[in-house]
Amino acid sequence: MTETNYDLELAALPQTYASALAAELKGLKAALAGASESSVIGVGSGGSYTVASLLCNLHETYTGRVSRPSTPLELICNPTLASSSPVFLISAEGKNPDITEALLRARRHSARTIHALTNRTSSPLMESIHGLTDVSAHVFELDKKDGYLATNSLLLDAMLVARAYGELDQSRSPFPDQMSQLRIGDQALPEWANNSRSFAEEAVKRGSMIVVYSPLLKPIASDLESKLSEAALLNCQLCDLRSFAHGRHLWLSQRTDDCVVLAITEPSLGQLWDKMRSLFPPAMPTMTMSLGGASPPDLIAGLVAQMQFVSAIASASGVDAAKPSVPDFSRKLYYLDLTSSIPAPTDMLAAAEVSKFEVMGARWPSARRLGSMTRARADFQSSLASQKFRAVVFDFDGTLCSSRRTDQALSTEIIRQLERLLQAEVVIGIASGRGGSILEALAKALPPELLERIDVGLYNGGWVGTASEPVVTAKETSEFLSHVTRLMRRLKSIGVPIDTVRPTHPIQVSVRFREGIATEQMWFVLADALRQAGLETASIMRSKHSIDILSSGVSKSGLVAHMIQHHRIDPYQILTMGDQGAWPGNDASLLEHRYSLSVDSPSRRIDRGWKLAPSHKRDVDATLWYLERMVTGLGGTFHIDL
């Protein structure tokens, strides 16, 4: 028989397997590690849904966090799914309009980083990602283009996800060097595929298949159903081994000649399946895909095996599963314009009020429609709009540039807005937990004559100067910080995922964690260590990328005090802005100022520190939204036009 396009795609799988084994996974592993303290939402269609399902399956297995695979439409219709969980969007080619719309809806509602796993550097999805902040793209190029059904892209992306989780868990079940070494129980892949052909022919004759599976192997079953249905090869039902006993068994007695049963099992449920099969009518054809377990290599072996099984069914049906006849209306269905077809869900509350309720813990079912909060927001907004300002103090990471582990450059839009304010003689201050790297970033972005006019408070305000002068810290050593440094290094030595401990005497000790580790939970680990040592914990401040332990009296508000004295500015004529406004966020002192705005997490005070920017704008996007509404006037003044 002549080889089909689908056969040729399957023949390329070993090469794709080798590419997946050789891929560098540092960024993807960091993303998964960073999501380990929360549930995740995996989003995809067709074969990409299988990868999303695999990701959620492994996330639950290794972290114990209940996670949910979703189609793009589920996220589009209910974007609050993304409100507190990291989202992983999967799309091989990135041209599916559904996934792009899901990205935009998720970015509008998500408070967490959004990740995209794709195989194309250039695509509509990537174009949308480039226009958004806090979206991480993990691109693994694939030269081969799949046909109608996902094959090589599915194997590549599934392997990348499975490898990443296995390596993060230091798995004792590594992937074999070659795909041919994968096994289905005690059978080699080619042997199992060959043995499945007669069963596939019987399934085609009967026209329907029931697939029962172990819950640990659901991604394999889901992908089989997807392929059989999308290529119109067979009617296929899915249920786990016990759900089958709750009614679907009637197919075996009332539609005996119309179906076959395939079981996808692993050792923990092998005995259950054997007992079930012994009760079936003798004439009912059955076959077992008995995997050796549910480890990442087992899941990949099952995915490859069912692709081979689909090939056998397609062959028995006389169909090329990679190149079916697709009518014109089908293409039009695929490329429907979702933006104009599906209205965006309306916010039931003003975004500013929602952010305040969230940071104060007033989530559903707490009362969130209290008039007092609405009045507080209206009062602050009115007061802000009527106030004239002479100065603005910005946080740096997460406010003027993206908060990433590696130092980020200022965007062209931010630079243009800063230059506009400086040229209008507005006084600008920048407060950051970092040190001299801030001065380097500013020197690359602005001319020397403007640098002289920017006040900076580095090391969380422990050193104050201008952006044009070198940082010179005092030479004395703080016993408190020395003790803190010893404690942090001891924590690192016993396995706490600390990357670096950087003391800057006599100001602070900055602690960074291994890539992908979120700082929310680590704050409690460090605070508890200080508490046990009898040290003060109120000075521990958290940003998105580090935790800083400050000496007494050090805070970003020190820069505000300096500017009041040095420039003789009325405190009420200074506007402050940051992303971490709720203590122990490192902008808490900045957003304690009377006139203060948040670009992400607001202050818990209801008379200040509001996030007035739209819900879908955060961090740099929110900063730009505020900057665009700063109207300059005479004498170095400006006001906010909302």
Image (cartoon, helix red, strand yellow):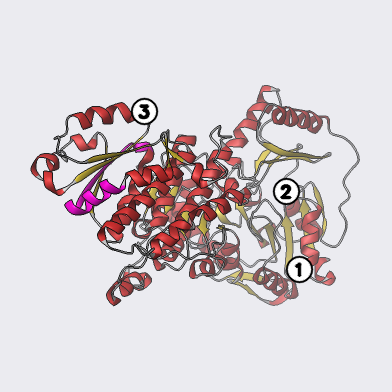
**What is the secondary structure assignment of the residue under circle 2?**
loop
Q: Which residues are magenta?
A: 197-216
**What is the secondary structure assignment of the residue under circle 1?**
helix
- Does the stretch in magenta take in 489? no
Residue 332 in the figure: left or right of residue 584: left
Q: Amino acid at mark 2?
A: Gly
Residue 624 in the figure: left or right of residue 123: right
Residue 565 falls in image quadrant: bottom right
Disc 3 residue crowd, few under 14, some 14–19, many 20+, Cα 10 Å? few
Q: Which mark is residue 268?
A: 3
Q: Which callout, 2 or 3, points to the residue nearer the camera?
A: 3
Where does the image place residue 199, in percent across and percent down from the top left?
26, 46
Question: In percent of the image, x 46 and y 57: which residue is there?
Answer: 11
Above or below: residue 203 compared with residue 394: above
Mark 1 vs mark 2, CA separation in Å = 20 Å
Give whichever of 381, 361 is nearer the camera.
361
Q: How many marks?
A: 3
The single residue placed furthest to the right in the displayed view is 475
Where does the image place residue 224, in percent across and percent down from the top left?
33, 50
Where does the image place residue 340, in percent across and percent down from the top left?
35, 73
- Does the stretch in magenta take in 209? yes
Residue 376: in sight, yes or no?
no
Which comes sooner in the sequence, label 1 or label 2?
2
From the image, tell me which residue sits under label 1: 445
Which comes sooner in the sequence, label 2 or label 3?
3
Magenta span dominant secondary structure: helix
Residue 495 in the figure: left or right of residue 100: right
Mark 2 vs mark 3, CA separation in Å = 51 Å
Q: Amino acid at mark 1?
A: Ala
From the image, tell me which residue sits under label 2: 433
Give whichever of 625, 61 is nearer the camera.
61
Question: In percent of the image, x 43 and y 44: which residue is there?
Answer: 189
